[in-house]
Image (cartoon, rainbow, N blue to C red):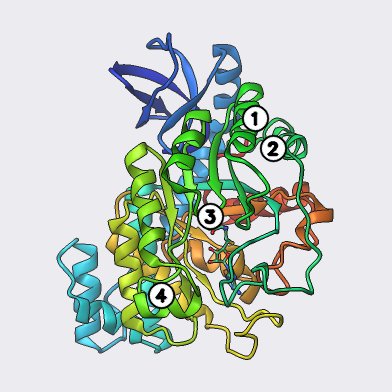
Amino acid sequence: MCYAIPGKITSIDNKFVTVEYFGEKKKAYNEFDNLNIGDYIYAQGGYVIQVIPEKEAISILNTWKETFFELQDLDLRLSKVDLQNKINDKYFLTILDKALEYKNISDNEFLYLLETNDKSKLELLYKTANFIRQKHLSNSCCVHGIIEFSNYCKKGCIYCGISYHNNNLLRYRMNTDEISEVAYKAIEEYGFKAIVLQSGEDSEYSIKQLSNVIKNIKQKSSVLIFISIGEIGKEGLKELYKAGARGLLMRFETSNQELYKKLHPNQSLETRLQHLEEAYKMGYLIITGSLIGVPGQTNNDILNDIKLTKKLNAEMYSFGPFIPHPSTPLANNKISSNDEILKSIAISRIIDPYNAKILITTAFETIDSKAREQGLLSGANSVMLNITPDNFKKHYSLYPNRAHINENIPLQITNTISLLKNIGRAPTDLGF
Ligand code: SAH
């Protein structure tokens, strides 16, 4: 569940509550003492994050009411799919049929979808995924904010512009007060209800310092916090969970062992996966996925990446194109096409139809200015806005020419909300 329309608690069953808004019922995990039936709350990622006064809740619900149903209607209209069309590839149509009926689809069939390049077939694949998204998750769209608080990194991933090899980069490190302040502003001033704290792997911050940052933010504001700071070990994960972090954003980057080794000298896929598995066991919500289009990757690898993301119990799928960075060993390689990403999104939706949040990554937006709209109409239902202060974000150079780099936060919010409204989506975690 991910929405910023407040809901009313209609039942409480141990640590779970049922919340209702506009006739929709959702479940959320509760860590608050003294919640009662009839209370109004905000929830994010399946967690109750805030109790709000009845008067305020009713007033927000009233302002939402009309818009909410109009948006749902529009989304429904845009997500119709018609398999009775001019495509005469029976095999392809049978696979989509199976997807619509949740029947088992074999690896060979998924590979057939991944290998498709015909425009009208792809259009139908995307529409099918969008139909499935609408059917199960309706029109809600998560809007998370990400703060990139340090671009120092001790790792040498050969595709990444902030890896320690890059000597052409101006390095920055926000201090702990700065991080808390930026988060506070994003939550209180701009209405974000879920934020990601990301950095390179930077041992300058101790786990204790990071715990304090998280505690500080949670003490002052109600928010769901994801961490994305690389491999900090089981103890580190435990400590940050205790401090109040509830999500981990960590891509496994590729499910192919050999390729992983080539891309990440002196690192192991096993360690990365252990972090994801341990974190899930501790109760973290998981955002994971891979890089699409890295040299040496096959369609079979991409399919395995999607399947692995599901196996890791991802709450959110994150697939982005590899974009060559001029100061890395992979500088001269090619960027993957937008269809490669749209196919990964659509197939993720088919593989995980009921619950998955699927993200439009900034890297995707960087290679295609229509990525958001196209992705959201191909099975995706999440976006992430960059809320790093302007003076820092230009130096968080994972890859060149990042999308939205020159847009300040209010402009990003306005643009996002207007795009979502145009396609009938409810930007469910930005208050407006
Ligand atoms: N230290 C954190 C965050 C890493 S940077 C961690 O270890 O998880 C965030 C993401 O940027 C990476 O997971 C990687 O998938 C992506 N990234 C890095 N270089 C990239 C490139 N050249 N093109 C596209 N995405 C890239």
Distance between the Cα atoms at labels 3 and 2? 20 Å
Question: Quick one: label 4, few (<14), some, or many (20+) residues within 10 Å?
Answer: many
Label 1 vs 4, first from the N-terminus: 1
Image height of 384 relative to 307, above or below: above
Residue at 50% in and 75% down: 265
Amino acid at circle 3: Gly
Give 139 or 175, whichever is nearer the viewer. 175
* Crowding at mark 3 (Cα within 10 Å: few <14, some 14-19, many 20+): some
User: Does residue 332 sit above or below 123 in this rendering?
Assistant: below
Of tags 4 and 2, the one toward the viewer is 2
Q: Is residue 331 above or below residue 57?
A: below
User: CB under 8 Å between callouts 2 and 1?
Assistant: yes
Ligand 1 closer than 8 Å to label 3 CB: yes
Q: Nearer the viewer, mark 4 or mark 3?
A: 3
- Which amino acid, by three-letter code, is at mark 4? Lys
- Closer mark to the observer between disc 1 and disc 4: 1
Q: Which mark is residue 82?
A: none
Q: Which residue is mark 3?
A: 230
- Label 1 beta carbon within 8 A of ligand 1: no
- Residue 116: percent from left, percent from top: 35, 86
Kindly report the distance in space between the C-alpha atoms of the residues bearing marks 4 and 2. Answer: 34 Å
Determine the CA span between mark 1 and mark 4.
38 Å
- Establish if 418 lies above or below 122: above
Q: Quadrant of residue 335?
A: bottom right
The numbered dot on residue 343 is: 4
Name the residue beneath numbered marker 2. 183
Residues marked 1 and 4 touching at CB (< 8 Å):
no
Q: Which residue is mark 1?
A: 217
Observer-side mark, 3 or 2, equals 3
